Amino acid sequence: ATYNRVSPGFIRVEADEVTYPLHVILRYDIERALFRGDMEVDEVPEYWRFRMKSDLGIDVTTDNEGCLQDIHWAFGAIGYFPSYTLGAIIAAQLFDAALADIGTHTLRSQISRGEFGPLREWLREKVHKVGSVHRSPDDLLQSICGQGV
């Protein structure tokens, strides 16, 4: 098995699988506080630095490596960050279901050889062909994985 090194960093898109959700949670918490009126926009950089230190143990020294690193807020994409974490959770659920259907050893061997065709076909049959038939993503996941998100 191969494992990624867990190492806190400033940049969300460079974060590992463990610390990435903390980046998302920080952004969500800021958006919520702003829309509730609990925070002013000019308080975001200081709050960002505080949370990065308390959540990840790192000192943010510039807004470029802090609250200005993402383009989402600049073009009005508010509430978007949690979808990244949901996508990762759903991907893990689907991969577990694929392992169960195709076989753990078989699928892992195929992937290690760069053979993604069988997984792609599994996704076509289980997800792509029927995705819009279901009322919700949870219903789709229920049909494939036996549970929703």
Image (cartoon, rainbow, N blue to C red):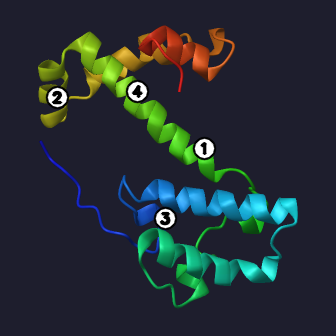
Task: Identify the amino acid type marked 2.
Answer: Arg
Dot label at residue 12: 3
Task: Identify the amino acid type marked 4.
Answer: Gln
Q: Is the N terminus in the top left, top right, bottom left or bottom right quadrant?
A: top left
Residue 68 in sight: no
Q: What's the residue at 66%, 18% (across, down)?
A: 136
Residue 88 in sight: yes
Mark nearer the viewer, 1 or 2: 1
Q: How far separated are the C-alphas under marks 4 and 3?
A: 22 Å
Give the percent coordinates (x, y) of residue 47: 65, 78
| Residue named by callout 4 | 93
Report if the CB atoms under discs 4 and 2 are less than 8 Å apart: no
Q: Earlier in the sequence, mark 3 or mark 1?
A: 3
Query: In terms of secondary structure, where does tag 3 sit?
Result: helix
Q: Quick one: label 4, few (<14), some, or many (20+) residues within 10 Å?
A: some
Q: How far separated are the C-alphas under marks 1 and 2?
A: 27 Å
Query: In terms of secondary structure, where does tag 2 sit?
Result: helix
* Whether residue 56 is situated above or below residue 93 in the rendered picture: below
Q: What's the residue at 60%, 85% (across, down)?
A: 63
Q: Quick one: label 3, few (<14), some, or many (20+) residues within 10 Å?
A: some
Task: Identify the amino acid type marked 1.
Answer: Ser
Q: Quadrant of residue 101?
A: top left
Dot label at residue 108: 2
